[in-house]
Amino acid sequence: MMPRVFPLLRTNAREAVRSLRRARLRTGLALVGVAIGIASVITLISLGEIAKARSRAELESLGTDMLTISTSGRGGRGIALSDAVRLADAVPAILAAAPRITAAGPVTHAGKKLSHGALQGVTNSFAGVNHLKVDSGRFISDFDQHRYFCVVGAEVARAMRRAGAQQVLGESIVAAGQPFTVVGVLRDTMERYALSFHLDANRSVFIPITTAQRLGDRPGITLIIARTRPDVHYTTATREVRSWFRARAPGLKLEITSARELIEQLESQMRLMTLLLAAIGGISLIVGGIGVMNTMLVSVAERRREIGLRRALGARRRDIRNQFLVESVVLSVIGGIAGIVAGAAGTWAICQLTGWDFALSATAAACGIAVSSLAGLFFGLQPARHAARVDPIVALQAE
């Protein structure tokens, strides 16, 4: 049985190609419809996978051990500085913790405005926890309490040089109406928008957190960035942190977010987004499939005499049906291959415009061929059955 199947398929495939070549315009239009549908699916799924990979890599570059602890609600009391500083020593799951206070306002040097970034009050541990690198000088020290020293981001340092500063270290800037002496300059830091907070290190001025408390009207800490110990699950760390603060500050409402939790939420959201994108592309594929069905129905109508002649020479109904089914599948598969090429080209072009790393989803490409083949079978079945039911006597009498 099986040895007879392959020669028949090969013969039907050759007949299908000849038939499709005879109706080039109609075949081309049907191919375009299928190719657009497959290209849409390939491009949308690939872009969804690329976006997911970029966001995951961005979070993982900071380490999956990151934990952010913030006060919830507006106007509520913040975390006491003494509790924030003691967190790493008091909670076994926490390796290091860095509290932060922020305030926005103009930063000037020699009377010239440098930026309108953040003024961040931090401790010495802030640089290590957030992977900040010092380009020159030093970072804020625990010995700088209540002193007017600062560390500036790379963009602020460049603005100071444009404003006439010969050397940034040792220069004076004015922030929040107070003069600060620059003791350090940070390297350029890429902003991570996937985080639950914005670091904005390049445009910021970092000062001792005790000095920031004196300058602001809310001395309480609103954010702590912490690192958990290796092999500690984020749920364990979250539970221990809540328990410790519940004992230290009853009634304090906290929001605790883990990088691992963000990754899990991100992957769940991106899976849903990829399915939605694939569904949108699938609509185009359905339109292309309808074009294939229309093409095959027209082909059946035009080839009634051929069908009648084959039936008269002994061809069975299933032979006629299989011939038109193979033709429909060949048409769809060729369109699918063209769609994969077009989808890859479209994905590459979008990646070039956005600066993303190009990657083609192998799963989407494999599914493209499979779906196009199934579309050929599904949308070609009705025309094939219609061809198989043609009365050979009526077909031979037709003009």
Image: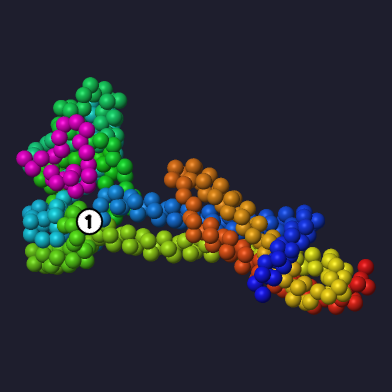
- Drawn side of residue 293 relative to residue 148, left or right: right
Task: Return the residue nearer the eye: 134 or 115.
Answer: 134
Residue occupied by mark 1: 65
- Using the rendered view, name the quadrant where residue 24 is placed: bottom right
Query: Where in the figure is residue 146, as x and y percent of width and height?
Result: 8, 41
Residue occupying image coordinates x 15% and y 63%:
241
Which color mode does the image show?
A: rainbow
The residue range painted magenta reads 122-143
On whether residue 131 falls in the magenta region, the answer is yes
- Drawn side of residue 319 relative to residue 371, left or right: right
Give the answer, above or below, for where 315 lies relative to 288. below
Q: Residues within 10 Å of mark 1 (few under 14, many from 20)?
A: many
Query: Where in the figure is residue 81, as x and y percent of width and height?
Result: 10, 53
Residue occupying image coordinates x 29% and y 55%:
196
Task: Return the residue nearer the eye: 80 or 91.
Answer: 91
- Drawn side of residue 359 relative to residue 105, left or right: right
Query: Where in the figure is residue 223, as x and y percent of width and height?
Result: 20, 54
Task: Return the residue nearer the eye: 228 or 299.
Answer: 299
